[in-house]
Every structure is written in structure tokens, then in C-alpha cells.
Image (cartoon, grey):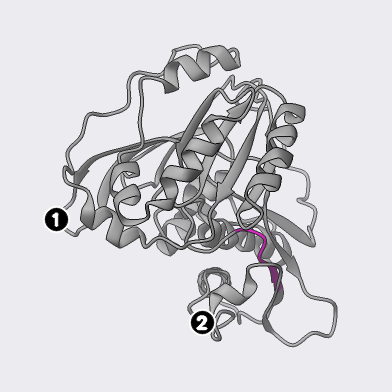
Amino acid sequence: MTEPPRPTAHARLARAKLNYALHVTGQRADGYHLVESLAVFPAIGDRVSLAPAGAAPGLSLSGRFSGDLGPSGSGEDNLVVKAAACLAQHLGRDADAALALKKALPVASGIGGGSADAAAALRLLRDLWAPELDDTILAELAAKLGADVPMCLFSKPARIGGIGELVTPLAPFPAHAVVLANPGIAVSTPEVFKALKTKANAPLPDLPHDGFGDLAALCAWLASTRNDLEEPARALAPDVDAVLAALGACAGARLARMSGSGATCFAIFETLQDAQAAEHALHADRPGWWIAAAPVERIGTLAG
């Protein structure tokens, strides 16, 4: 059966990446760290879009955190620009797209903002330039852009392995909500890995063979996991302690943990209403922090 034409989108949500668990299990000779993670992608993120007709090729920036990308933030080092160039080179065409990035996620915050932006750009431009291009090829291009880009390309709950390029979908997976909080500091991922005392740590426990049927099962499994980067990040950025304490004290919080290399932390809640109530309370207590509530959608089957 012929696959129906893929519609051309005009914008893509570059979903934040949350590491519900992150175990560092080794380090390769080339310096890359081996990880095992359970990654989840709530419905919150930056937005990558096609610029209005007539706009000059390139990348325009907007949004709360666009200034944190620096004076050359829209230049060739931006992962959106790199993604456009990578796909164009594969297709043998000019990277002549006019793109816009609304930067809603904090920069260097452990939630995959740049990688998610690159993944969104790949999907957006594939649909525009070569809608027949297979997702497998797109994933191979994503891996050239960074270890986190393939999982962000997928943007659904998954077990992650290797250096981040091995993505195994999880299903079923329960609906719930999260609150994300960042104290307004950037943390250097290389510095956190450098401060990690032990590079060969225990792997993730086995996943339930039939997936996570409800939130209680997910939280019970997460209780036996950890984020190996949390301790070195807390040593480098003590503000992480305050974020974790504040999230853990919220009514209804099931689990509070740091994501990635920090400094963004998250708490898991049963409902979006509970998460939004916690968000409002935290805003009142910590007006200088970036705080956001977001839903995590249910995945019924791998096709869902």
C-alpha cells in the first residue's frame, strides 16, 4: 500500500526532554559517555517555524530565552542552522530555508533544548523539501548532529542507550503531568561529566515486559533508579538543592529529580490540575525561577 502524502507543517514544537532516570554506565575511548535513560517529552518546548513568505534565508530568534543564545545565536553554530545544512547536504540542495526559533526553554538547562530544536527543524524541512524521505534516514542525520537529537526526533517515552542514539519506544505509558523548574543558572554539561567520580555505574533495572500500566507502576520503578549526574551538578550548582527541595515539598508531588546535567529539575504529578496548582504556588514563592507545568500524554500502544 502506498503511504499517503505527508502534509507540510509550518511549525513544530521542539519538546523538552526530561530524563526521568539517567545512569552513566561507562565511557568510550573517544570520550563519549555510555548512558541508560528513561526519557519523556512533555507538551512544552521551543517552537521552530517557517518564516513568512519573502523572508530572507536564515534563522530569526524570538522568545524569553533567545538573548541567552548570545550575539551569534542565529549563526552557523545554532543546531537549527546545522540541521538545515545537514539535511540540505543529504538532499543535494541549497539550505535556503527561512526559519524562526521561539526560544521558550532555558539554555544549557539539561532538558535538550538545542537538540529538540534541531530535531524539529529536521522534521519541518523534511516535510517541506522531501516528504518522501524515510524516518530511518532522518534518524541517521539526527545522530550526526548530537547524541540527544535522535531521541528528540522521536519525542515519545523511550528507553535510551549507547551514547543516546539507541531509542527503544515504551508502551503502554501512563498519562500524568510534570512541573519543571530552573533557578536561572546555566550548567556546563562537560563540567558535570568531568566532576562525575565514577563513570561505570550500575545499569537501569529491567523494564516491565508489559510496560507501565499506571502512574503508580512507573513511580515504583523510578524509585529504584537515579540520575548519576545529580550529585556532581549539585556540587557545581548548589541552587539545584533548593529546586529539588521546593519541588519535593509540593502537594501531590510523586517524585522530584534533576533532568540531564541540570540545572532544571522536575516533579511528577498525577494530573495537570495538580501540577498547575504546584506551579502557581512555586511562582509565588520563587518569582525569579523559570517554572512551567505540562502534560505527558498517554501512550496506549507503540502505534499510539
Residue 76's disc is 2
Q: Position of residue 137 (x, y in %)?
A: 51, 54
Residue at 49% x, 46% y is 151
Three-letter residue code for mark 1: Ala
Quadrant in the picture for the C terminus: top right
Residue at 39% x, 47% y is 165
Most foreground residue, 3 or 287: 287
- Element at badge 1? loop
Identify the mark nearer the N-term, 2 or 1.
Answer: 1
User: Is disc 2 in contact with disc 1, using a CB cutoff of under 8 Å?
Assistant: no
In the rendered image of this protein, does residue 83 appear above or below residue 228? below
In the rendered image of this protein, does residue 184 appear above or below residue 283? below
Residue at 60% x, 78% y is 93
Residue 205's disc is none
- Residue hosting label 1: 29
Three-letter residue code for mark 2: Glu
- Element at badge 2? loop
Most foreground residue, 125 or 284: 284
Residue extending furthest toward the right: 53
Q: Which residues are magenta?
A: 100-105
